[in-house]
């Protein structure tokens, strides 16, 4: 039987996201300025891993920008299993 998944978009605490590296560069600072000015950003993409944690798949600069701004949560999208066919 195939697993059925659905995409979930919600706000996730930054401290539950594992990231392989933090790109502290000009792009991250520019993105932080845009977010601080009210620009809406698309959700980052995550993968669920053990113990209620997530692995960052896409959106490192957004993650860093939110950290620089002191945010505790970020909009994120991930797959959630919903059952079997």
Image: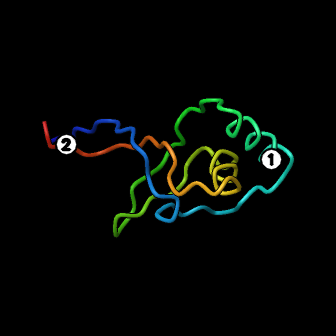
Q: Under tag 1, what secondary structure?
A: helix
Task: Residue 61 in the image: state x and y as whole percent.
Answer: 70, 47
Residue at the image point whose x is 21% and y is 42% from the top: 3
Name which residue lies at 69% across and 49% down.
65
Within the image, what quadrant is residue 24 found in? bottom right
At numbered mark 2, what does the secondary structure look like: helix, strand or loop?
A: strand
Q: In this view, does 66 lie to the left or right of 49?
A: right
Please tell me how many numbered marks the rendered image carries.
2
Residue at the disc numbered 2 = 82
Q: Residue furthest front?
A: 37
Q: Which of 71 and 21 is in front in this view?
A: 71
Residue name at image x 55 percent, y 49 percent = 57
Of the image marks 2 and 1, the number of the one nearer the N terminus:
1
Q: 54 and 29: which one is in front?
A: 29
- In the visual, does 47 lie left or right of 63? left
**Image quarter (top left, top right, bottom left or bottom right) of the N terminus:** top left
Count residues near mark 2 (Cα–Cα under 10 Å), then give few for <14, some for 14-19, many for 20+: few
Q: In this view, does 7 lie to the left or right of 44?
A: left
Residue 62 found in image quarter: top right
Q: Position of residue 19 (x, y in %)?
A: 60, 61
């Amino acid at each position: 039987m195939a697993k059925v998944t659905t995409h979930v978009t919600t706000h996730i605490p930054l401290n539950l996201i594992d990231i392989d590296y933090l790109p502290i560069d000009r792009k991250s600072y520019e993105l932080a300025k845009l977010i601080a000015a009210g620009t809406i950003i698309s959700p980052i993409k995550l993968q669920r891993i053990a113990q209620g944690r997530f692995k960052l798949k896409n959106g490192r600069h957004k993650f860093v920008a939110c950290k620089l701004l002191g945010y505790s949560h970020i909009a994120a999208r991930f797959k959630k299993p919903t059952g079997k066919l």
